[in-house]
Amino acid sequence: MTTKVAVIGAEGRMGATACEAVEGADDLELVGRFDEGDDLGDLGGADVVVEFTVLSASERNVRHCVERGVHVVVGTSGWTDERAAQLRTEVEAKGGVGVLIAPNFAIGAVLMMQFAKQAARFYESVEVVELHHPRKVDAPSGTATRTAELIAASRAEAGLGPVPDATTDDPDGARGASVEGVPVHAVRLRGLVAHQEVLLGNEGETLTLRHDSFDRVSFMPGVLTGVREVAKHPGVTVGLEHVLGL
């Protein structure tokens, strides 16, 4: 059975790559390409929509899909747990519609987040460094934020206290952002695509977890998996790991 797919944000870098990936899949059919200003209408008769836009438009786009009973795979950065919770009630009311919100579609990045979650309970110190191309509009990245949230939850469950840091003078914010108590640093550099390190430390040892995406095609296996699996997960699901069985 062929699944009909539409892409919102089809003229963007990720959206265009997603269109190519769908067209190259034997079990999927691309039935719609939409971008800013387009009338979404009936979404081209799609069964599943892939949404890669910006947060200000993403919430409206996702609700448009849900209202029409169309499953959605969301790759737009910036969706918080609070936003997902607000959407959850609306999605559940539709009965059977699935919305998958994924901070990162690279399989390696998802594994890195899961490894960091497991390791965090064993280390006193932890920091996250995310590195992206300079055209990225948000910082920290959705992946870094999600990673820090998973780390913080793991540390809390293990009974660990705050990350040790004697800094008292940092007027320019050199220590980075704090996401649930986890320091997160953002680098924007020409030549990069999407990269992240999780640094963990104890007395006498460190552990570094790093993932690198050198091309946007690295995200496509995860996108296509999301498209194929989203209908099996009614409601709102945050994180690709849930459809990967991790």
Image (spheres, rainbow, N blue to C red):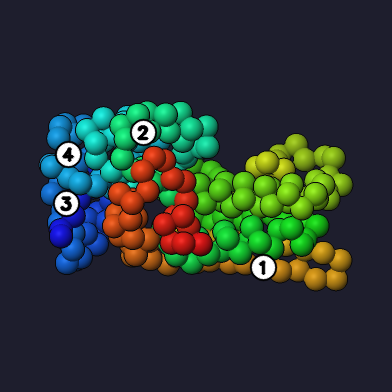
Q: Secondary structure at mark 1?
A: strand
Q: Earlier in the sequence, mark 1 or mark 4?
A: 4
Q: CA distance from mark 2 to mark 4?
A: 18 Å
Judge whether residue 40 can be spotted in this image: yes
Secondary structure beneath dot 3 equals strand
Q: Earlier in the sequence, mark 3 or mark 1?
A: 3
120, above or below 7, in the image: below
Element on which disc 2 rests:
helix
Q: Residues within 10 Å of mark 3 (few under 14, many from 20)?
A: some
Q: At which x and y percent is residue 21? A: 24, 62
- Pointer 3 with pointer 1, Cβ within 8 A: no
Q: In the rendered image, which residue does mark 1 sit on?
A: 208
Q: Which residue is mark 2?
A: 91
Look at the numbered disc 4 and give the secondary structure of its residue: helix
Which one is in front in this view, the residue at disc 1 or the one at disc 2? Answer: 2
Mark 2 vs 4: CB contact within 8 A: no
Earlier-in-chain disc, 4 versus 3 = 3
Whole-angstrom CA distance, mark 1 to mark 2, is: 38 Å
User: Which residue type does callout 4 highlight?
Assistant: Leu
Q: Which residue is mark 4?
A: 43
* Residue shown at the point (29%, 57%) measured from the top left: 228
Farthest residue to the front: give it: 95
Q: Amino acid at mark 1?
A: Thr
Between marks 2 and 3 in the image, the one whose residue lies nearer the viewer = 2
The front one of 214 and 102 is 102
